[in-house]
């Protein structure tokens, strides 16, 4: 149920200008933080402004002041003060021309889950010069869906299993599984060099930092990158096959830090081929220029298996995406030089 007062809506049901809005929290918003609730409705309003509205008490729940971390409950009444959004800035599901849509393979779908095989080179969401990604396209293609959110993310160049939630209750449960280490993620990755260990645990603390050129990066927390806020990360690597100068590994994520696999392997001296941030740039340049099947124009990192417990049925599920065509061609060329 939604209660509004003197309010105008754009074609996506986001207020364009109004007095006060009052919304009753339904199942889809249950247990969501109030700041995230606001961010999703006012995607192009600066977060600093929305936080200011919370701090000043202009956003209230059941008539009371709340903090940004307050988790909304079923039946709560949220009071939102006037917020002006121009038509240009508002979030619109129909803003993407169908001719620009990417083709996805659906690996699994039901009333609460959607699992796709994400192509390499496609971002999971828009931003930083990218007009749209997976989530924006799927919302545009399915305007009747009231809810769709990414459960986790994959780097733009990474292909493979991507999990989305079609119900907030499913999203909350799957995030609980991630926090509890109950979601198993396996990647196939090709590195430069000959890897020798059949199985190797890598446990290193990682630290985010900003490079001199303004680029955001991640490094192992040692020396100049040591930081008390660094987060422990754990990856298990298993050797699948080795060739001269290349090795194929299975990488199992035990934690899910930003760029974890990429940074771990670069630190060990086995950079992922095609990695334009942490890789061997000379090797990448050579592979991109190579003619024929040995050519590789993106990072060789593929999310091939994801194990979860279904948020509704409790059934343990294994979701798999076959190795993408460009990566399979590269392996075939190593097998048949």
Image (cartoon, rainbow, N blue to C red):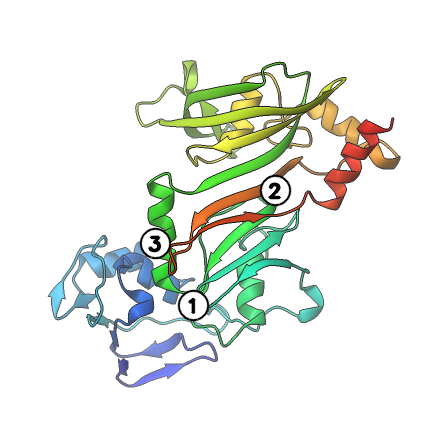
Residue 187, above or below 57 = above
Residue 30's quadrant in the figure? bottom left
SS at mark 2 in the image: loop
- The correct choice, above or below, for 123 with respect to 299 in the image is below
Other-residue count near label 1 (Cα within 10 Å), few / some / many at <14 / 14–19 / ≥20: some
Q: Residue at x 77, y 17 (%)?
A: 244
Rounded to the nearest angstrom, the CA distance separating label 3 from label 2 is: 25 Å
Q: Nearer the viewer, mark 1 or mark 3?
A: 3
> Which labelled disc corresponds to residue 158?
2
N-term mark: 1 or 3:
1
Residue 314 at least partly seen? yes
**Left or right of 331 on screen, residue 55:** left
Q: Which mark is residue 147?
A: 1
* 102 vs 22, nearest the viewer: 102
Residue denoted by label 3: 173
Density class for disc 2 (Cα within 10 Å; few <14, some 14-19, many ≥20) is many
- Cα separation, mark 1 vs mark 2, equals 25 Å
- The image position of residue 142, as x and y in percent, is 54, 72
Residue at coordinates 43% horizontally, 67% vertically from top-left? Answer: 147
Which secondary structure lies at badge 3? helix
Quarter containing the N terminus: bottom left
First of labels 1, 2 by sequence position? 1
Vertically, is 1 above or below 183? below
């Amino acid at each position: 149920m939604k209660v509004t007062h003197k309010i105008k809506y754009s074609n996506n049901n986001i207020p364009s200008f109004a007095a006060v809005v009052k919304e009753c929290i339904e199942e889809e918003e249950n247990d969501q933080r109030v700041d995230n609730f606001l961010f999703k409705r006012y995607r192009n309003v600066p977060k600093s402004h929305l936080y200011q509205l919370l701090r000043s008490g202009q956003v209230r729940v059941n008539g009371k002041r709340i903090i940004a971390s307050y988790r909304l409950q079923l039946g709560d009444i949220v009071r939102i003060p006037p917020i002006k959004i121009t038509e240009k800035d508002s979030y619109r599901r129909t803003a993407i021309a169908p001719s620009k849509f990417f083709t996805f393979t659906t690996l699994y779908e039901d009333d609460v889950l959607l699992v796709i095989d994400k192509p390499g080179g496609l971002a999971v969401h828009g931003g930083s010069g990218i007009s749209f990604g997976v989530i924006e396209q799927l919302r545009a293609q399915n305007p009747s869906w009231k809810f769709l959110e990414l459960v986790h993310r994959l780097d733009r160049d990474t292909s493979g299993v991507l999990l989305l939630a079609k119900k907030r209750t499913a999203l909350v449960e799957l995030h609980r599984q991630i926090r509890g280490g109950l979601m198993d993620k396996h990647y196939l990755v090709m590195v430069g060099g000959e890897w020798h260990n059949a199985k190797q645990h890598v446990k290193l603390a990682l630290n985010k930092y900003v490079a001199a050129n303004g680029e955001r990066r991640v490094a192992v927390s040692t020396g100049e990158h040591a930081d008390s806020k660094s987060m422990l990360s754990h990856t298990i690597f298993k050797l699948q096959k080795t060739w001269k100068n290349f090795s194929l590994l299975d990488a199992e994520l035990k934690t899910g830090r930003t760029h974890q696999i990429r940074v771990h392997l670069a630190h060990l001296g086995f950079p992922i081929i095609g990695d334009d941030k942490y890789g061997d740039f000379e090797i990448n340049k050579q592979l991109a220029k190579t003619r024929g099947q040995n050519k590789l124009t993106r990072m060789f990192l593929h999310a091939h298996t994801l194990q979860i417990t279904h948020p509704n049925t409790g059934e343990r599920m294994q979701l798999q995406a076959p190795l993408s065509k460009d990566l399979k061609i590269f392996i075939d060329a190593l097998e048949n030089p």
